[in-house]
Amino acid sequence: MNKVFGMISLGCDKNRVDGERILGEIRAHGCPVTDDLENAQVLVVNTCAFLNAARQEAIETVLEGNGYRTGKLEKIVVAGCLPQKFIKELYPALTEADVFLGISDASELFPALERAYAGERVNAVGRGNSQRERLVSTPAHYKYLKIAEGCSNHCTYCLIPKIRGKYLSYPMAALEEEARSLGETEELILVAQDTTRYGEDGGENLFVPLLKRLSALENIKRIRLLYCYPEKITDELIAEVRDEPKILKYLDIPLQHADDEILRRMGRKGSRTEYLALIQKLRREIPQIAIRSTFIAGFPGETEEQHRHLLSFLEEAKLTNCGFFAYSREPETVAFGMKGQVHPSTKKRRVRELYAAQEKISAAYLRTFEGKTVETLCDGIDYEKGCFVGRTFFQAPEIDGCCFFTAEKAEEGKRYEVRISRTGAYDLYGTCGGSAAEKGEI
C-alpha cells in the first residue's frame, strides 16, 4: 500500500505513545503521514474511553472525520481504548469506521486495511502487538516513555482495569533500549497508570533500579516522573530523586481527595494525615521539590463539609499545581451504583471553588521566583505573545504552566537562564540571560 495517512490522537500521554506505535507501523511500511487531513487517504483516530465525555469526543471525531470522504479520504481506522472496551456496541453502530484496532494492535493495521480495501469492515481488536518502534509525535527534545500497561489498583470510579487489564511492567532491558533509540532527549517523561508500581507484577518493585538504568544513558539529559502513587513513594525513591542530577525535582502524585471517608469509598490507600506527612517529608528531603496532584470533586456521597476538608487540605499542603475534575459516573464501576450521587451543577461549582483556591496558592509559589533566574527548556515561539516559550523544572508539558521569555535568539530544545520579571497564576515571564550551557551549568 502507498496511501497517505493522517492521525488524530485523543486522550492522555499514555495513549499518545500507543498512537506513536501506530505511526511507527505506518513509517515501516513506507507510507507518508500528513498533518493536513484533507490530503489523507486513511485517517486513524486513536481514541480514549476513560470517561463518558472522552467517549463522546471520540465518536464525534470519527463522525467529523467522515466528512473528509467528499475529498481524498478512503478509509477510517478507529483504534485505542474505545474499541478495546466497547467493540461489541461500536462495531454495529459506528458504520463510518472501516477498521477497529485495540490498544496494542499496531501490527494489525496493514493486514486489516488490506481486508478493508477488499470490501470488508474489519474488527481486529486484540489480534496484534505493539512491538514496532515509535514515530515520536512530540517536539524532538522531549519524549514519553510508557513503562507499564494496565492497572491493578481498582479504584471504585475507574474503568482503566476493564479497558487495559491488569498492571503489566514492560521488561527493563526493552525500556532501556527504547529510551536509547529515542536519540538525544532533553526531557524523558515516564508514564504509566502507576509508575511507582513498576516491577511489582513480577514480585519485586523495580522502579528505582529502572531509574538508575535510564539515568545512566548518555542521550537522556533529564527525567520527569508522572503518576507516582503516594503509598509507593518510598525512602529509596525519595533518595533517588534527591541525589540523581538527571531526575527533575518534580513529582506528580494523584491524590484524588483528602477526606478519609471519601478516600475509603474511592478505594484509595492513604489518609489526609499520611498525605500531609508525605508532603512534609518530600520537602524536608528535597527542599526545592515541586509537587503536582489531581483531585475529583463531587464523588458520590461527598458532603459540603467533606468538600471543605479538601479545600482546607489545599491550603495546608500548598501544592505547586493541581488539576480538578468533576466526578464522572461510569458504568461497570463500583461507584456507579453508590448512593448519594451529586448533582452536576454542584460538582461544577465545587470544581470552580477548588480551582479558585489553588490559583492563589500557585500564584504565591510563582511569586517567589520574581527577580530570580530559572533554567528554562525552550519549547519554541509563542507567536501570539511575540516571545519564546519554555518550561522550568516544575512545569510538565500540557498540564502545567509555561515560562514566556524574550531573547535575541533561542533554539527549541535548548536550555536557557531566564530572569523572571513578573508572574501570573500559572505562568512566568522574563528575559533570557544566555544559555545554561554557555554558563557551564549543564
Image: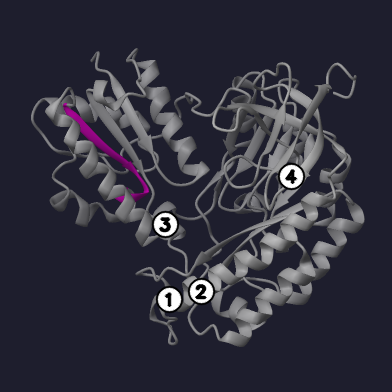
Judged by depth in the image, the label closer to the viewer, 2 or 4, is 2
Q: CA distance from mark 4 to mark 1?
A: 32 Å
Q: Earlier in the sequence, mark 2 or mark 3?
A: 3
- The quadrant of the rendering that contains the N terminus is top left
Q: Earlier in the sequence, mark 4 or mark 1?
A: 1
Q: Secondary structure at mark 3?
A: loop
Residue at the spot of label 2: 349
Question: Is residue 38 something one can see in this rendering?
Answer: yes
> In the image, what residue type sits under mark 2?
Arg
Q: Is residue 75 left or right of residue 232?
A: left
Q: Is residue 77 left or right of residue 213?
A: left
Residue shown at 40% from the left, 43% from the top: 10
Q: Is residue 372 left or right of residue 193?
A: right
Q: State the mark number for residue 50.
A: 3
Residue density around tag 2, few if under 14, some if 14–19, many if 20 or more, within 10 Å = some
Q: Which residues are magenta?
A: 74-83
Compared to residue 151, the image places residue 224 above or below, namely above
Q: CA distance from mark 2 to mark 4?
A: 28 Å
Residue at the spot of label 1: 345
Residue shown at 71% from the left, 16% from the top: 409
Q: CA distance from mark 1 to mark 2?
A: 6 Å
Compared to residue 43, the image places residue 308 above or below, namely below
> In the image, what residue type sits under mark 3?
Phe
2 and 3 marks in contact (CB < 8 Å):
no
